[in-house]
Amino acid sequence: MAMYRYVKTYPKKPFRKPVIVSYLLMTLGIGILAWTLWPIMSFFTYDQIMFAKTVSPVDEGGVRVTAPVAYAASGTASTDPNTWFPTSPQKKVVAPVNSYTLSIPSLGLKDATVVIAGDDLGKSLIHYGGTGLPGEYGNTVIFGHSTLPQLYRGTQDYHTVFATLPTIKEGSDILVTYDGVTYQYKVYDKVVVEPTDLTPLEQRFDDSYLTLVTCVPPGTFWYRLNVKAKLVRI
């Protein structure tokens, strides 16, 4: 007599590869977004007090005064320094030396080229024509591009050369070698201003000053960071 046994089996659930891949891609996307936005968010958090005190002036009625972005027409931060302050274009000066170098040891920036009255921030830092020369009485104003600090490449890429400048501390040294002489400047202040604020171009002749200008928050061109330094006299 034949014996039969009925055994009930359940089919195995298929491996849901598409769902896993979707979750992985979603996680990767969130990670990239956080990686991109973190420098901007941390800038507003870390520099909140400095930002609040120096930007967004108000009129007598307490209304915030917003200046138009100088290069809003292009939608991007221009490599032409003449578009940064269209109401106060730089002067084409003739100097015995038309370029020099700048180093910021605390940021790992070494011997960045600075061109006097240059016209391409993608190739060098720009000494705004008409502002004081290094070591002399007056205010030396130097422009440089910035981007996300994760993309910082120092002098290998002048589109990122000032990417870490917002992290500079008061008391940090800035070294400028001009015409064979190295001048030591020490940072005493940093402020954030509107893009059309012309105060960084102001000249004071009681001493030798240096102002570094770049766009902030990192990766944007919404505002300008002015790092102010004064010559150390030995």
Image (cartoon, rainbow, N blue to C red):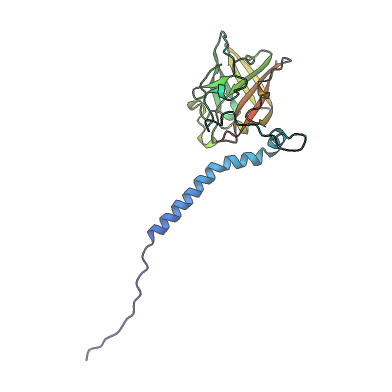
The percent position of residue 126, horizontal first and vertical second, equals 56, 20
Residue that appears at 61% across and 42% down: 41
Farthest residue in the right direction? 60
Q: Is residue 195 above or below residue 139?
A: below
Q: Residue 177's image quarter?
A: top right
Q: Quadrant of the C terminus?
A: top right
User: At which x and y percent is residue 226?
Assistant: 65, 27
- The percent position of residue 73, horizontal first and vertical second, equals 54, 30
Which percent across, then down, holds residue 121?
Answer: 52, 24
Q: Quadrant of the N terminus?
A: bottom left
The residue most toward the bottom is 1
Q: Nearer the viewer, residue 160 or 222?
A: 222
Depth order, front residue of 218/149: 218
Q: Is residue 9 above or below residue 170?
A: below
Where 19 falls versus 178 (above or below)? Answer: below
- What residue sits 66% from the left and 23% below the top? 200
Depth check: 151 or 139 in front?
A: 139
Q: Which of the 4 image quarters holds residue 51?
A: top right
